[in-house]
Image: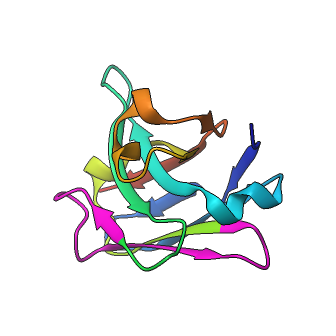
Amino acid sequence: QVQLLESGGGLVQAGGSLRLSCVASARSFMFLGMAWFRQAPGKDREFVAKISWTGDTTQYADSVKGRFTISRAYADLTTYLQMNDLKPDDTGVYLCASGVAWPNIDKPSNVDSWGQGTQVTVSS
């Protein structure tokens, strides 16, 4: 399994922006669907965004459409999540995920590898 390492979280005011990064440990990244999930205290893990292994198909949760953008850089084995116009409800631990079961990697049960997560806190 590929190992995933996230970075880029932090504390930001409402309306601000952050860019999360997720670096994969192996070139098998090239053939994996990638996704971001988030988990707030006391809540279930929630799908945020996903991108196909070809990079030409993306999908977002309704709550982040128009504000978040997922992308991937093959040369760097990195997946990004650009988050704009952040809201307090976006607060949580953001986890990078990978899987071969495209397009169904928006379900945690279909994810093969998880990162350790990075904390995002949005203040009002």
For the point 75% across and 67% down, which residue is it? 77
For the point 54% across and 46% down, which residue is it? 100
Q: Is residue 38 left or right of residue 8?
A: left
Asked if residue 42 is among those painted magenta in the image, a careful observer would answer: no
**Number of callouts:** 0
Q: How is the image coloured?
A: rainbow
**Residue with the most extreme top position:** 42
Q: Is residue 40 left or right of residue 18?
A: left
Of the 4 image quadrants, the one containing the C terminus is bottom left
Q: Quadrant of residue 76?
A: bottom right
For the point 53% across and 74% down, which residue is it? 54
Residue 4: image location, x then y, percent: 72, 46
Asked if residue 76 is among those painted magenta in the image, a careful observer would answer: yes
- Vertically, is 120 above or below 46? below
Residue 101: image location, x then y, percent: 45, 44
Residue 107: image location, x then y, percent: 34, 36
- Vertically, is 21 above or below 37? below
**Residue with the most extreme left position:** 62
Q: Which span is picked out in magenta?
A: 58-78
Nearer to the camera, 29 or 89: 29
Nearer to the camera, 101 or 65: 101
- Vertically, is 110 above or below 34? above
Of the 4 image quadrants, the one containing the N terminus is top right
Residue 99: image location, x then y, percent: 54, 44
